[in-house]
Image (cartoon, rainbow, N blue to C red):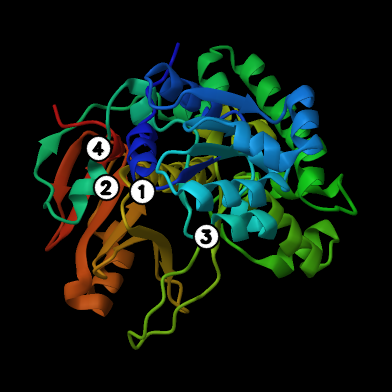
Amino acid sequence: MLFQRHLRERVERLLQMMPAVFLQGARQVGKTTLAKRLIEAGILNDYVNLDDPLIASAVQQDVIGFVRSLSKGTVIDEVQRIPALLPAIKMRIDERRETGTFLLTGSANPLALPQIADALVGRVGLATLMPLSQGEIEGVRETWLERIFEEEPSIAIYPRVDDLPERLIRGGYPEAVLRTDPDSRREWLIAYLDTLIARDVRALAEVERLTALPSLLKLLAAAPCQILNITNLSRELGIAQPTLQKYLSLFEALFIVVRVPAWYANIGTRLLKSPKILLSDTGLAAALVAVSTQRMQQEPLLFGRMLENFVGMELLKQIQFAGARVQLHHFRTDKGMEVDFVLENETGQLVGVEVKAGATPNAGDFRGLRVLQQATGERFARGILFYWGERSLPFGERLWAMPISALWSPPL
C-alpha cells in the first residue's frame, strides 16, 4: 500500500522557488519513496543514494567532478553521509542558480551538522517529513490547523474513534502501520531503534555510554509529553547533566524526540520556561515500554499522556505540510495552571489546545485555557479541548470542546 504524503505539495512548491530542497526526517518515514514519486511524476529526473558503497566511493574520489556531472533535478539521498559533498553542491548552485537543481534528503537535522548548515543558508528550502498523520493513513487531507485561526468551530458531529488506543500503539511509521500483528510491529520498531542507535548516533557524534541511550529513551517513553526535568533524569540514570543534554540533542537531530518550548510573554504572571519533550511517534514510545491496548485502557494516566503526545505530533505534522508559519508551544504558570499546547501564528494570535482522554468534557477542564485567555486578551483567538467523543460544543466565549477526530476528519 502506498500512502499519499501531504508534504509533497510543499516540496514541489519549494523546488519551484529554490535551487535545492533539503527533505529531512527520521529513517523509514518515507523520504526516499516521496523522492521517487517526484521522479515518476517528471518533477525530478535522477536518483543517487549515498548509502550505496559504490556510489559513496565514487563521490569521495572526485567530489566536485561528481556533483558537476549530475543533471538538474537529481535526488541525492542521505546526503549527510558525505559532508564534503555540501561545499561542492554549494559551488554548483552558485555557478548556475537554477531552481529545482537538487532534492537532498537526510536522516539527520542539517542544523546539527555545522558543515552542512553553512552550505544551506540562502540556497536550500527545508521541509520535514514526519511519520504518517492520521489523515494520510485514512486518505484524508487535514485542514484543521489552516482553519482554526480564522473560523469559529460549529456544533457538529464527527466520526467516533473507537480504536484510539490502537492508533496510539500503531504510530505512524509506514512499515509499522502496514504490520497488522502487534508483536511483529513491536519487533520491527525495537529493531529500528537498535539500528538507529548503533549506526546513526555514532555517525553524528562520539558517545561514551552508548548503552545509556535506550535507558534514556525508555524513561521518556514511560512518561511522554512531560516538562523536561534534567535534574531528575540525571539522578535516575546516573548520568551527568551535560551528557544528558548532549544525548537529548542527538535524539532531536535524528527526529526521535521533539522539544516543545514554553510559551512566554510579559503578561504579569510568572511562567515556567522549561520545554516539554515529545516522542516523535507514539508507536515507538509504546514499543519501548511494551504497552499493549489492554494496558493502555487499564492505566488512564499513561493513556492520557500518550494521547497528549499524539495530538502534539499531529499538530506538528499539519504545521509542516501546510507550510504554516505557526509555532507550537506549551503554557504553564508557576502555580501549576497549564495548557497542553499553544499555537501562535505570525501575527501573534494564539490558539490554546487541551487534551482530555475522557468522553465527557466539563467546565473544569477549561481552567487552564481560561487563564491563558484572561492573560492574553485579544491575542487569544480560541481555546480548544480535544476529547474522546463525537460532538463539538461551545463552553463559553471562544472556548470549544471538539472530538479528537476533528483533527483529521470533516464533520458528518
Label 2's element? helix
Give the secondary structure at mark 1: helix
Q: Is the Cβ of the residue at disc 2 closer than 8 Å to that at disc 1?
A: yes
Is residue 192 visible in the rendered image? The answer is: yes
Q: Eyeballing the image, is 216 above or below 329? A: above
Q: Which residue is mark 1?
A: 319
> CA separation, marks 2 and 1?
7 Å
Locate the N terminus by quadrant.
top left
372 in relation to 151, above or below? below
Establish if 399 lies above or below 410.
Answer: below
- Mark 3 or mark 4: whose residue is earlier in sequence: 3
The residues bearing labels 3 and 4 have C-alpha atoms spaced at a distance of 38 Å
Q: Nearer the viewer, mark 1 or mark 3?
A: 3
Residue at the extreme bottom: 268
Of badges 2 and 4, the one in the foreground is 2
Q: CA distance from mark 3 to mark 2?
A: 28 Å
- The residue indicated by pointer 4 is 406
- Amino acid type indicated by mark 3: Val
